[in-house]
Image (cartoon, grey):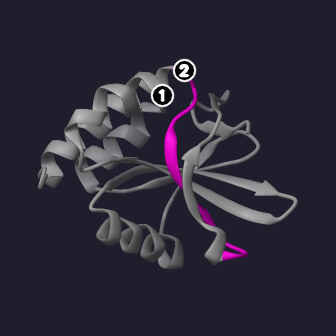
């Protein structure tokens, strides 16, 4: 596959715009490589740093994907970060875009309380009043 990071970044920005993400968040990703975390309940954005950023970079290295946004949620079993990412499989991008339009993207869910239960899967998302994202299921 070996799609370049720049190619994935172009695709990521396209997806962020399609999701209606806060324009400044898109610009920070595009110009500064900042990955933002959409925090509940309003979806306000905070830059990933420290351990959060290290987990993201570890995932990117293992998957050869590019994380462009994280949707944080707090559940009965603890905090979970859902990584929205561009995969290394260009032939799947069209399907992934369609899933985003339907509010049901495939992502990697990082279970912060029980890391051994982290996994790929589809989640439900919706835009918030702050032009962020919230996980619905």
Q: Nearer the viewer, residue 52 or 25?
A: 52
Find disc 1 in the rendering and name its residue.
100
Q: Helix, strand, or loop for circle 2?
A: loop
Q: Which residues are magenta?
A: 102-114
Whether label 1 touches label 2, CB < 8 Å: yes
Instruction: Identify the residue at image location x=24%, y=44%.
Output: 89
Instruction: Identify the residue at image location x=11%, y=52%.
Output: 4
Instruction: Identify the residue at image location x=33%, y=63%.
Output: 63
- The residues tagged by marks 1 and 2 sit, at their Cα atoms, a distance apart of 5 Å
Q: Position of residue 99 (x, y in %)?
A: 48, 27
Q: Is the residue marked by circle 1 packed among few (<14), some (14-19), or many (20+) residues within 10 Å? A: many
Instruction: Identify the residue at image location x=33%, y=71%.
Output: 62
**Vertical placement of residue 134 versus 100, above or below:** below
Q: Position of residue 85 (x, y in %)?
A: 39, 48
Q: Helix, strand, or loop for circle 1?
A: helix
- Asked if residue 20 can be seen in this view, the reply is no
Q: Position of residue 12 (x, y in %)?
A: 31, 39
Find disc 2 in the rendering and name its residue.
102
Q: Nearer the viewer, residue 105 or 25?
A: 105
């Amino acid at each position: 596959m070996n799609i370049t990071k720049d190619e994935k970044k172009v695709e990521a920005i396209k997806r962020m715009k399609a999701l209606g993400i806060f324009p400044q968040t898109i610009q920070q990703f595009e110009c500064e490589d900042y990955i933002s975390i959409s925090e509940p309940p309003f979806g306000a954005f905070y830059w990933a740093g420290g351990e959060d950023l290290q987990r993201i970079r570890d995932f990117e290295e293992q998957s050869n994907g590019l994380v462009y946004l994280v949707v944080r949620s707090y559940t009965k079993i603890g905090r979970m970060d859902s990584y929205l990412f561009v995969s290394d499989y260009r032939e799947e991008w069209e399907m992934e875009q369609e899933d985003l339009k339907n509010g049901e993207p495939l992502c990697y869910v990082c279970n912060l309380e029980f890391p051994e239960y982290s996994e790929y899967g589809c989640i439900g998302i919706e835009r918030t009043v702050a032009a962020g994202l919230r996980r619905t299921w």
